[in-house]
């Protein structure tokens, strides 16, 4: 399951190449706490540290969603035309958008992993759904604008931003698999119990 979750948006680049800020710091704090929780022997203490990791990852995620929406509005409204160096202004915004996307993606995967390891499937599904909602409401409707302003996008089929938008299909597939798996186990358990009752 962790490998499947990690495949969501696997084209994202390395986070924050030398450009640390408070929001990325929250993500790294959550990552560090998550890694520390995995080696803690005491169950109660491990759960406490994992909960702190979730809080930090959630804060980073929420703040980055707000920031990426702000940067996309900037592009949609053409505010870069008011700047002296239009190309530089667009490049800076796209750099920030990519950084935000990376943090949102990785914090989502980590949150889902924490819930999965704690066997909290409903919470994991809620995390995946929230990421899907973000893709559906923020990325998919603006994929053309993002691709047109991003010099690294080919604007062809399966371009950089189109592939990110298609991550929504992967999210939906993961959710269906998880839901289907849960149903399968419930049905199998019911059949076993009914077989035992017949005996």
Image (spheres, rainbow, N blue to C red):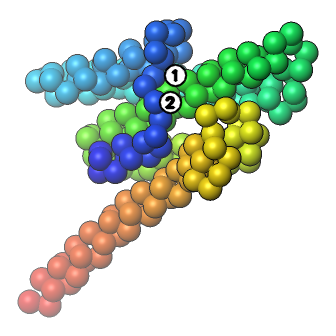
The one of 126 and 9 positioned closer to us in this rendering: 9
The Cα atoms of the two marked residues, 1 and 2, are separated by 11 Å
- Identify the secondary structure beneath mark 2: helix
Which residue in the rendered view is the most extreme toward the bottom?
Answer: 198
Which quadrant: the C terminus? bottom left
Mark 1: few, some, or many residues within 10 Å (few <14, many ≥20)? Answer: many
User: Percent x, y for residue 110?
Assistant: 37, 34
Q: Residue at x 29, y 51 (%)?
A: 1
Q: Quadrant of residue 196?
A: bottom left
User: Does 194 sit left or right of 177 as displayed?
Assistant: left
Residue ID for mark 1: 60
Above-or-below relation of 34 to 155: above
Q: Is residue 150 visible?
A: yes
Above-or-below relation of 36 to 198: above
- Identify the secondary structure beneath mark 1: helix
User: Percent x, y for residue 13?
Assistant: 46, 30
The one of 56 and 151 positioned closer to us in this rendering: 151
Q: Is residue 26 visible?
A: no
User: Does 79 sit left or right of 112 as displayed?
Assistant: right
User: Does 166 sit left or right of 55 as displayed?
Assistant: right
Say the numbered circle drawn on residue 154. Answer: none
Nearest to N terminus: mark 1 or mark 2: 1
Residue ID for mark 2: 102
User: Percent x, y for residue 121?
Assistant: 36, 50
């Amino acid at each position: 399951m962790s490998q499947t979750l990690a495949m969501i948006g696997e084209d994202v680049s390395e986070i924050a190449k030398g450009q640390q800020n408070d929001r990325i710091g929250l993500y790294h704090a959550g990552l560090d706490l998550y890694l520390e929780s995995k080696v803690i022997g005491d169950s109660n203490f491990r759960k406490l540290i994992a909960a702190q990791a979730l809080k930090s990852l959630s804060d980073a995620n929420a703040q980055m969603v707000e920031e990426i929406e702000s940067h996309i509005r900037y592009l949609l409204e053409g505010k870069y035309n008011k700047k002296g160096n239009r190309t530089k202004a667009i490049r800076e915004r796209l750099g920030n958008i990519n950084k935000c996307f990376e943090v949102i993606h990785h914090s989502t995967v980590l949150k889902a992993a924490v819930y999965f390891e704690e066997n909290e499937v409903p919470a994991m599904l809620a995390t995946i759904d929230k990421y899907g909602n973000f893709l559906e409401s923020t990325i998919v409707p603006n994929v053309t604008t993002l691709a047109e302003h991003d010099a690294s996008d080919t604007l062809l089929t399966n371009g950089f931003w189109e592939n990110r938008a298609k991550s929504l299909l992967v999210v939906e597939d993961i959710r269906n698999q998880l839901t289907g798996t849960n149903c399968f186990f419930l049905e199998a358990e019911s059949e076993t119990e009914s077989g035992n009752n017949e005996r």
